[in-house]
Image (tube, helix red, strand yellow):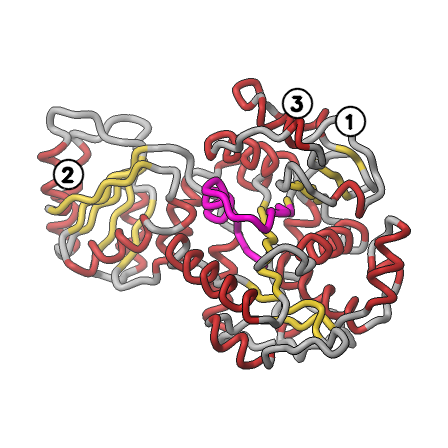
């Protein structure tokens, strides 16, 4: 597996762990092209997609004029290129129009610790000096709205297949099983293929209530209702199953999906979203909501085309987020012609990839017995590759001896590991 440099990884991992801002009004006042560019980049991130963002010119003076006769929003970010003495004069004018409850962030052009401390003493919620990475800027905004509940906000990892039959669900379910049962991370597998989902089959459970019940009643959906819908598979693994019947398929609305995922974030530290292979417009919301995305594919031309289409669209939806992980599954299946691995990854433009060798006996036996492949053949090369997928998904350090795909993940130790293990008190 190939990965970018460590500095890039650190910034991306910081972004991955950030919850989205709530549905607030966020007004940004730029004074320079650099400030405006930063605002536009931030507005395109997953964390700000729910906020109603507006970008205006004029810096602090523009904000003072705008709010002379109108209330300030929940979040106000202003840029100023003034020197400290003049900057505090500008802030004194701004303080006269800012209403209680507005969080004020100042972007300046002077990088000075004394200035930062004085800003906080004056009531500014944060001060940052340009230039700065968009990840750092978004992290500051996200932390302003976490409060005491921030530690309870979980993460969503989406698994999707390039087409039907590539094994995306099997990879997702095995990775979730591993994270829950070995790493003790409270995990919910949410099967979004309402008609033909296989999570219930793979985990050998028959759930009486399903994800369709959650999506059909989002106006009354709350944590208590989600709790009733979850089927407990093991101490740390829960399932929000698909109905698996055409009679219970309900239209999936973006708002309803967002509500369900918000509640799952509050209940468990990790939600594995098993998306269907057939594209639907609501899946955009799932992609935007997800901290990470895994695309599973086989090495044929049709799958290559589909992965490229998916990857290109995901980049547009998440321009500042970590690219998806490409899982190349069923590699080496008999005499089936295959696109070379390196050529496939290069063509679709995904540098991070993991190869899962075809293991007919292990996968077949696990499917027939309602067990995970990791249970059936834990020492196989395919199992080692799936452990890499799980490590990437949850930012875990990789185990020694499981480097089947040449990954460099074992060099990374995520600060989120303990948070994932400790968060969530669901029994």
Q: Residue furthest top?
A: 220
Label tally: 3
| Cα distance in 3D space between marks 1 and 2 | 54 Å
> Pointers 3 and 2 in contact (CB under 8 A)?
no
Provide the residue designation for mark 1: 208
User: Is residue 103 shown left or right of residue 264?
Assistant: left
Question: Magenta stretch: residue 285 in it?
Answer: yes
| Cα distance in 3D space between marks 1 and 3 | 14 Å
Q: Quadrant of the C terminus?
A: top right
Residue drawn at point x = 60 percent, y = 47 percent: 276
Which mark lies nearer to you, 1 or 2? 1
Residue 45 appears at what percent x and percent y? 38, 51
Provide the residue designation for mark 2: 63
Residue 179 image-quadrant placement: bottom right
Residue 373 appears at what percent x and percent y? 83, 59
Query: For the magenta stretch, what is the residue range?
Result: 272-294
Provide the residue designation for mark 3: 225
């Amino acid at each position: 597996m190939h990965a970018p440099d460590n500095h890039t990884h650190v910034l991306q991992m910081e972004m991955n762990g950030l919850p989205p801002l709530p549905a607030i009004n966020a007004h940004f006042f730029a004074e320079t092209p650099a400030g405006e560019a930063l605002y536009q980049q931030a507005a395109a991130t997953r964390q700000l997609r729910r906020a109603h963002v507006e970008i205006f010119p004029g810096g602090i003076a523009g904000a003072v004029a705008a709010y002379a006769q109108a209330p300030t929003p929940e979040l106000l970010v202003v840029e100023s290129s003034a020197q400290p003495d003049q900057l505090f004069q500008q802030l004194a004018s701004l303080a006269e129009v800012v209403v209680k409850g507005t969080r004020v962030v100042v972007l300046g052009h002077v990088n000075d610790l004394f200035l930062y401390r004085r800003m906080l003493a004056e009531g500014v919620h944060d001060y940052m000096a340009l230039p700065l990475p968009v990840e750092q800027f978004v992290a500051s905004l996200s932390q302003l709205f976490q409060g005491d509940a921030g530690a309870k906000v979980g993460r969503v990892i989406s698994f999707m297949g390039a087409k039907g039959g590539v094994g995306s669900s099997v990879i997702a379910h095995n990775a979730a099983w591993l994270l829950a049962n070995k790493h003790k991370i409270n995990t919910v597998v949410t099967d979004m293929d309402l008609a033909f989902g296989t999570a219930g089959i793979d985990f050998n459970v028959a759930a009486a209530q399903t994800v369709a019940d959650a999506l059909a009643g989002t106006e009354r959906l709350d944590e208590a209702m989600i709790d009733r819908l979850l089927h407990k598979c093991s101490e740390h693994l829960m399932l929000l199953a698909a109905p698996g019947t055409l009679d219970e398929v309900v239209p999936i609305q973006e708002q309803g999906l967002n509500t369900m995922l918000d509640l799952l974030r509050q209940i468990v530290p990790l939600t594995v979203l098993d998306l269907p292979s057939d594209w639907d417009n609501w899946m955009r919301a799932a992609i935007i909501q997800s901290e990470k995305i895994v695309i599973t594919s086989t090495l044929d031309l049709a799958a290559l085309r589909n992965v490229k289409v998916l990857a290109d669209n995901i980049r547009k939806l998440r321009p500042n987020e970590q690219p998806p992980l490409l899982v190349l599954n069923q590699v080496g299946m008999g005499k089936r012609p295959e696109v070379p691995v390196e050529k496939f990854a290069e063509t679709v433009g995904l540098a991070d990839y993991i190869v899962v060798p075809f293991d007919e006996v292990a996968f077949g036996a696990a499917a027939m017995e309602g067990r995970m492949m990791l249970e059936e053949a834990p020492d196989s090369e395919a199992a080692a590759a799936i452990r890499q997928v799980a490590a990437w998904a949850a930012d875990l350090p990789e185990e020694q001896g499981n480097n089947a795909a040449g990954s460099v993940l074992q060099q990374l130790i995520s600060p989120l590991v303990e948070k994932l293990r400790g968060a969530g008190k669901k029994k």
